[in-house]
Each structure stands twice: as C-alpha cells, then as structure tokens.
Image (cartoon, rainbow, N blue to C red):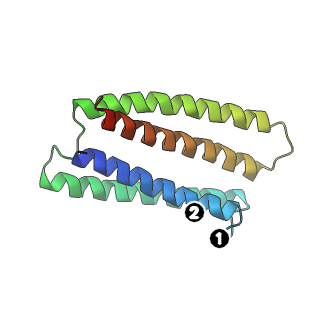
C-alpha cells in the first residue's frame, strides 16, 4: 500500500512523463508540430516545467491539508528515493554518453537538445519504475 506521499510522487511523475511523451510524439511527427527554433523549444520546456511546479505545489498542499505529515516521506520512502535516485543518475550518465556519441554525427542543435531531454526522461522513468519495484519488494 502506497502512502499519500508516495502516491503523490508517482502521480506527479507519471503526469510529467505523459507530457513529455506528448512532446516527443510531436518531435517524431505523430501529432501536432514540434518546436524547430531555440526559442520555441525553451518556451515549450519552460511552460511544461512551470506547469509541473504549480501542479506539484497544489498537490502537496492538497495532500498536506488532511495531515501535515502525509506530504512528507517516512524513513522507508526516503531510503527508496535515495536508491532510485542513484540508479536514475547512473542511467542519466549512460544516456548522456550515448548523446555524446551521436554529437559527432551531423545532427542539428534541436536534435541534440531533444536527445538530452530524452536521456533525462528515460532516467526519470527508470527512477520511477525502480522506486515502485523497491516499494513493492518492501525495501
């Protein structure tokens, strides 16, 4: 059973990953149009991150309004977060090394930027899956 804190983190992470899935579906041409200039890319990224921050604050206030300790992790959740952060960081480094490999091919700056963003998203997805596995295994 997930605590209110864990549920909040999981739902916020899934929401953010869904938004980035939409972004990458525009980049791959499945829906809508992708940003092609630096300003379009960073405006989109800024709107996503500011929106995520606002939703995170609202979620923390809502979860914390019922019980102020509900919006805080307990000792077990802190341990799970620490382990998943470490594993996610390893994945981020691996993804950035892959991006460095492709940096020597003729890619546009927007393609490199999207590749770095993809590496970050893959590491976040890895952290989320690993954290859920650790919580299920009772770590």
Q: Please identify the residue farthest to the left as the structure is shown.
A: 67
Q: Please identify the residue farthest to the right as the structure is shown.
A: 106
Within-10-Å neighbours for mark 1: few <14, some 14–19, many 20+: few
Q: Is residue 32 above or below residue 75?
A: below
Q: Which secondary structure, mark 2?
A: helix
Q: Quadrant of residue 63?
A: bottom left
Q: Quadrant of the N terminus?
A: top left
Q: Is residue 61 left or right of residue 66?
A: right
Q: Residue 54 in the image: state x and y as whole percent.
A: 37, 58
Q: Quadrant of the C terminus?
A: top left
Q: Which secondary structure, mark 1?
A: loop
Q: Residue at x 30, y 51 (%)?
A: 8
Q: Is residue 87 above or below residue 106?
A: above
The label on residue 31 is: 1
Closer to the camera in the image, 94 or 48: 94
Q: Is residue 59 above or below residue 139?
A: below
């Amino acid at each position: 059973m997930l605590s209110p804190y864990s549920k909040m983190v999981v739902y916020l992470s899934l929401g953010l990953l869904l938004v980035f899935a939409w972004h990458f579906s525009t980049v791959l041409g499945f829906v809508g149009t992708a940003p092609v200039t630096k300003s379009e890319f960073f405006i989109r990224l800024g709107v996503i991150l500011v929106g995520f921050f606002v939703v995170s604050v609202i979620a923390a206030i809502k979860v914390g309004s019922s019980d102020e300790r509900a919006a805080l992790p307990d000792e077990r959740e802190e341990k799970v977060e620490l382990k998943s952060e470490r594993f996610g960081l390893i994945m981020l480094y691996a993804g950035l090394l892959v991006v460095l490999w492709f940096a020597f091919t003729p890619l546009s700056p927007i393609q490199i930027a999207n590749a770095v963003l993809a590496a970050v998203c893959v590491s976040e997805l890895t952290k989320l899956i690993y954290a859920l596995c650790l919580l299920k295994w009772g770590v």
